[in-house]
Image (cartoon, rainbow, N blue to C red):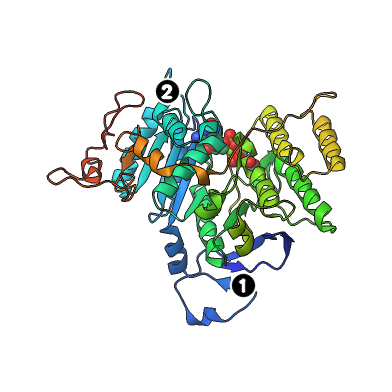
Amino acid sequence: MRIELPRKSERFGANVFYGPVPVYELDGGLRNQRDDEPGAIVALPYERLHEVQRQMAIVVPVKGERIRLVEGILFAVPNQCLTIVVSNSPREPVDRFRVEQQALCTFARLARKRLILVHQKDPLLARAFLEAGYPELVDTDGRIRDGKAEGMVIATVIAHLAGKRYVGFVDADNFSPGAAHEYICEYAAGFALAECQYAMVRILWQSKPKYVDGEVYFAKWGRTSRVTNHYLNQLISRYTGFETDVMGTGNAGEHALTLELALRLDYATGYGVEPQHIISLLERFGGERESPFPDVMRSGVEVFQIESRNPHFHKASEESHIRDMTRVALSTIHGSFLCPDTLRRSIEEELQRGGCLQPGESLEPVRRYPALLDMDFDSFRDTVEHRIQATSFEPVLPARGALRRRHAPGRPRWSERFRPTSGQPPTDTGEGVDTDL
Ligand code: GDD
Ligand code: MG
């Protein structure tokens, strides 16, 4: 991949936000010495991207998506990445999760692919979070709460236990596997450029096409992202004293983090998760309050924004969904201790204008989940070990416990036992079942 080096950046405490950079060549070829010359555009050879991707988990959150779309995303993930699918698909009246299991199993067999599939409502996962000292994610019914962010948190823990260094997210409702593949290469490109271990890569879509008057119109900004970016930029500007437009990816559903950073940020529920990442960086590493992680303050945080070449085609959203998403996104800014009162009032007026907040109604703070770093990961592993109602195809979770399994002599390794050869997934005998992995 050939990519422009960021020229513009905004510093906020220990954070560096690089302005969006375009890609000049999707495939930059193999390593070539001529490319070692420094310049405005850098060539990242295929080997370098491969090296990063080997250490990367790609997470696909799914809730009731058409199976053809989910499959399209699986085809897009480079073979060297570990794929983690967290499904919150309905199990009744039709068991959509079962359909997903079957499709993934067939795919893993044909593509020789490392995949993990879990269901968000598996009671064992909820128990694992409770016992690991992270009860916030669990609802009163004893299951993990609904929401895309909640699925992302589960997957982040699994990626960490699987020994990965990077975790990237790709929505399952993308119509174009080619675009999803490009995003994953751009994640690798960002990490290849990063100079510190706390880094994030966010994708700025080249366009989000829609039909206007019977023609395809390549819109640049989504309805929510236009507003979220404006207020995030306003927040940064209020502290730096210089108006900025550096932030173009406030709602970037397609983004990736180093695990080191992912474990130190807090999360907002549902679709608030992406703007909350920025708020969390500003709050924790912005220098306005003492940071809980002095090591990050010393090392710094880098945020890359990479502009994709493929347009982003995905399932169209209803107006009410957009309004809810805008509300939750702006609520992450509004609820921050960093947000000045004047900006709070502007946000309220903006939400009222857009019909997202009724006059007199107050904007409730968004539910937040604390950083994962303090979780007891060994306990989590012990709880789910051998028993998660997951379909793990091919060698998956590496070796400490079963998220690093000790091999008992005379017993086939679990990866051998469950390597799908018949095209059928392991028997699913009910929720929370002991599949004895
Ligand atoms: N595991 C899980 N659990 N996945 C979910 C859930 C859930 O409760 N809810 C939704 N998903 C999955 C969907 O199946 C899809 O793959 C992905 O999360 C995104 O959901 P969409 O409903 O398609 O979101 P969107 O298109 O409105 O918004 C996306 O783009 C925004 C930026 O424009 C999301 O990625 C937002 O987070 C992002 O801000
Ligand atoms: Mg979508």
Q: Which of the pair 66/45 is nearer the observer?
A: 45
Query: Helix or strand or loop: what does disc 2 sit on?
Result: loop
State the residue at coordinates (35%, 26%): 432
Q: CA distance from mark 1 to mark 2?
A: 49 Å
Whether residue 305 sits left or right of residue 186 in the image: it is: right
Question: Where is residue 165 shown, x and y percent of the image?
Answer: 46, 56
The answer, for residue 170, to whether it is visible in the render is no
| Tag in front: 1 or 2 | 2
State the residue at coordinates (69%, 27%): 320
State the residue at coordinates (52%, 65%): 192
Question: Where is residue 293 shown, x and y percent of the image?
Answer: 60, 54
Toward the top, the furthest residue is 93
Q: Which of the pair 32/373 is nearer the observer?
A: 373
Q: The residue under label 2 is which amino acid type?
A: Arg
Question: Where is residue 410 shown, x and y percent of the image?
Answer: 12, 44
Indicate which disc, 1 or 2, sits on the residue closer to the N terminus. 1
Query: Helix or strand or loop: what does disc 1 sit on?
Result: strand
**Which of the 4 image quadrants contains residue 242?**
bottom right
Q: Are marks 1 and 2 in contact (CB under 8 Å)?
A: no
The answer, for residue 5, to whether it is visible in the render is yes
Split into 4 quadrants, where in the image is the C terminus?
top left
Q: Which of the pair 168/277 is nearer the observer?
A: 277
Q: Which residue is mark 1?
A: 41
**Which of the 4 image quadrants contains residue 267?**
top right
Q: Which residue is mark 2?
A: 91
